[in-house]
Amino acid sequence: MNKIQTADVLPKRKKQRGMQLSAPSNSYKIQFNDIVIFILERKMGVTRRMFLMDLARRKGFRVENELSDSVTHIVAENNSCAEMLQWLKGRRMGDRSGFRLLDVSWLTACMEAGKPVDSEKYRLLISRDPRENRNLSPPRTKPVTSQKISQYACQRRTTSNNYNKKFTDAFEILAENYEFRENEGPCLAFRRAASVLKFLPFTVMKAKDIEGLPWMGEQVKGVIEDFLEEGESPRVKTVLSCEYYRSFKQFTSVFGVGLKTSEKWYRMGLRTLEDVQKDKSLKLTRMQRAGLLHYEDLISCVSKAEADSIALIVKDIVWRFSPSALVTLTGGFRRGKKTGHDVDFLITIPEARQEEELLHQVIDVWKKQGLLLYYDIIESTFEKTKLPSRKVDALDHFQKCFAILKLHKERGDHSSSIVSYDSTEEEVKDWKAIRVDLVVSPFEQYAFALLGWSGSRQFARDLRRYATHERKMMLDNHALYDKTKRIFLNAVNEEDIFAHLDLDYIEPWERNA
Ligand code: DCT
Ligand code: MG
């Protein structure tokens, strides 16, 4: 076996940027002979693969350029097990008994530890997502209603197939109305009921269908019965025509406007966004000004294709500064949603400790490139020893950036709108403003941050409620604390957190509660 290996020649682009990567001629001593790594370029890209190969070699790992029989560990990023098997099949390497298929987080954990870590937790598993591999997932045959349905969303598998949209949309309107009036009880009741109906694998057709379901209180039943008998809900109609609700709905649809500002505006006699725009005496925050300026773009949904384009932009820039960083698309898109109101990312740097700098570096480049329409960096206030928050909706303490990015439309996309500046000049607007959230977590908190930021909000709330009431534990986006044993429980991935809570693992696309 080769004891000395030579690093690949780095691409010119990287070197020109002055990256501090080792010189191409460097050779490194192999320290861990039992492991032979191959890193898949697919979805990772040449530059990042090169960087990771070089890094692993510097740390004493044997990394092969080509896939061969000697490889023991195949590392991939953003590839599912099904995709990997397909890829291997194309290389006539379909039998995966000879090597382990691992997520890139195994490699980064090794880099962090400076030695091989147990790879079991990082194995790519055969997915149960029916969209991913239809042949591998057995259909769920047992009728759901014959089983007892848990009151906790984290014990239900809720995909984005909602058979009861008619009801859940109505509940959301009623819940929102209570939220605007700061009446928490009934607001929560309608949200919990909506979450249960989203889980049902059939459409509610008669009153008997909701018998025995959790969270079906009198008010909820009333609305369902109205729909079943009249095809609509008078209560919902009343809310929709109510001036208070309509004003709050408009006001809160602006980025940067919450309940407090909406109340103030309403008290001042403002009723519509036109009123707000016209009132020159209003003191708007920078965020609200940006929200109003890009209002039309921001209220139109972000598509998955747009989210993917943003992901490329984010990864490109993050990896330029921290090539070993893990960048994960979180929020609704991680749950398989096809549209969203923003694009959420979680970033962590396994080995280096330059976390605080990264967001600033990213922002500086975007500013120079003219990509930033708005940004606000909130610095981290995270403390390792702090107990998880008791408040279900408490904000986390990670460093983050709320931004609006300019996403240029592809050539050939004819949906560009014409913006007229005066009667003679017309300019084509070839970009769309997109809300982007970037969250940076320390590596040890990554699994907790990922679970929290993947949502849904209702799912995450119920996980915390479950931890508190069923397990005497405290969970938030940073940590899990066992109150009985008085210890923090560590987790390298989301599966660990579910296991600590003694819950069956729920995949991200089953968290659309
Ligand atoms: N979240 C959090 N702390 C915050 C904001 C959000 O833990 N301060 C969690 C809740 C869900 C997840 O992060 C993503 O938040 P949203 O983008 O608001 O929700 P979404 O599910 O991505 O929905 P949308 O598709 O509308 O963006
Ligand atoms: Mg989101």
Image (cartoon, grey):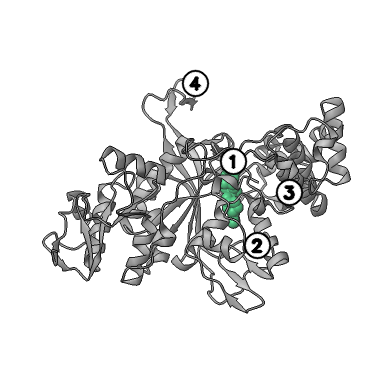
Q: Which residue is mark 4?
A: 423
Pick whichever of labels 4 and 1 is earlier in the sequence. 1
17 lies above or below 222:
below
Q: Which residue is mark 1?
A: 292
Q: Quadrant of the N terminus?
A: bottom left
What amino acid is labelled 4 in the image?
A: Ser
Residues at marks 3 and 1 touching, judged by CB atoms closer than 8 Å: no
Return the x and y of residue 279 as percentages of the image width and height: 68, 41
363 lies above or below 311:
below
Q: How far apart are the alpha carbons under marks 2 and 3? A: 28 Å
Residues at marks 2 and 4 touching, judged by CB atoms closer than 8 Å: no
What amino acid is labelled 2 in the image?
A: Ala
Q: How far apart are the alpha carbons under marks 2 and 4? A: 50 Å
| Direction from residue 27 to residue 293 in the image, left or right | right
Q: Which of the numbered marks, if any, corresponds to residue 394? A: 2
- Few, some or many residues within 10 Å of mark 3 (<14, 14–19, 20+): some
- Residue 289 seen in the figure: no
Q: How far apart are the alpha carbons under marks 4 and 3? A: 62 Å
Q: Secondary structure at mark 4?
A: loop
Please identify, in this view, whether the residue under mark 2 or under mark 4 is nearer the observer: 2
Towards the viewer: 411 or 87: 87
Q: How far apart are the alpha carbons under marks 1 and 2? A: 27 Å
Pick whichever of labels 2 and 4 is earlier in the sequence. 2
Asked which quadrant contains residue 119, the reply is bottom left
346 lies above or below 169:
below
Residue at screen point 50% across, 36% down: 131
Residue at screen point 35% across, 71% down: 113
What amino acid is labelled 1 in the image?
A: Leu
Return the x and y of residue 234 as percentages of the image width and height: 86, 31
